[in-house]
Image (cartoon, rainbow, N blue to C red):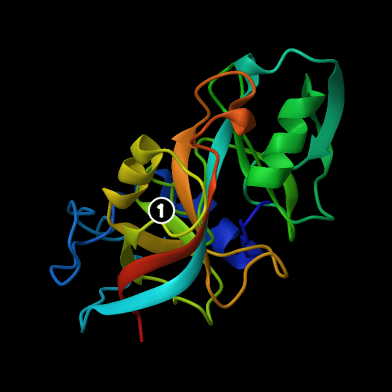
Amino acid sequence: MSRFVLTLATALVLAACGGDDTPPAAQVSETPGHPPGTGAYPGSATPPIPQVTGKVVELAGWEVTVYYTAVQSLHTDKSTEVTGCPTIDCGKNRNQQRLGSFPASFVKAVKDEGTGKTTDGRYLNWSYDTGYWMDTAPRDTDGRPLRPWISAAADAGALGAGSRFTIQRCGTAEVTAEVCAKLKAPTWTIVDEFTPGLGGNKHVDVYIGEETGANFTDSDLYTTLENATLSAVRAQ
């Protein structure tokens, strides 16, 4: 289920200002885990991730799902034609053209997950308000590159943009100890939004980077945590 929501205004500004160079977000000392980074380059029009400080709160009963970037080379089924924008700076009904022919399962994964890496190193991305487009990186809702094991998505009413959290307990779902440990290790940052209707009041989606093998969705890592407990610093 894709969670990418890219506004046309953001896309136009990003294309004009070279938004690919945006580095990671600033660290929040109140939240345990590895430091997320250092904010946007001076002069970049890509919105920086908000600085968040405040009290750490424990949030129980959450659903945690994962999302990833599909990799074309891992998909070998029959190809299908894709139409969309040749760059990030056009809307759903403007400048639509043939983008190429890609494996059908890859195209479906791009629509479900939001991003896919093609064999030539470019990215086929998708959002509900733009459709498909070609890009140089997988993107969050404000056009920043997604960062594996840091970027996360939520509805704004659940955890606002810039909120940071760690997973303290993996809850009641059957997941391996190894996967649970991997998901608990990072400090995640909310930079992305669900496609309307796919989120919820206690639902976060965490970005784990590129799929690592064929039939990735059958792997232990493509999982859902139920009744998980988060430790979070909320954006106000």
Q: Is residue 14 visible?
A: yes
Instruction: Count all numbered tags in the image, as a single digit.
Output: 1
> x%, y% of residue 89?
64, 51
Q: Nearer the viewer, residue 145 or 3?
A: 3
Amino acid type, mark 1: Ser
Q: Is residue 47 visible?
A: no
Crowding at mark 1 (Cα within 10 Å: few <14, some 14-19, many 20+): many
Residue at 57% across, 78% down: 201
> x%, y% of residue 114?
63, 46
Q: Nearer the viewer, residue 137 or 193?
A: 193
- Residue under label 1: 151
The image quadrant that residue 147 belongs to is top left
Quadrant in which the C terminus appears: bottom left
Residue at 61% across, 23% down: 118
> x%, y% of residue 68?
54, 40
The image quadrant that residue 97 belongs to is top right
Eyeballing the image, is 221 above or below 189?
above
95 displayed left or right of 125 = right
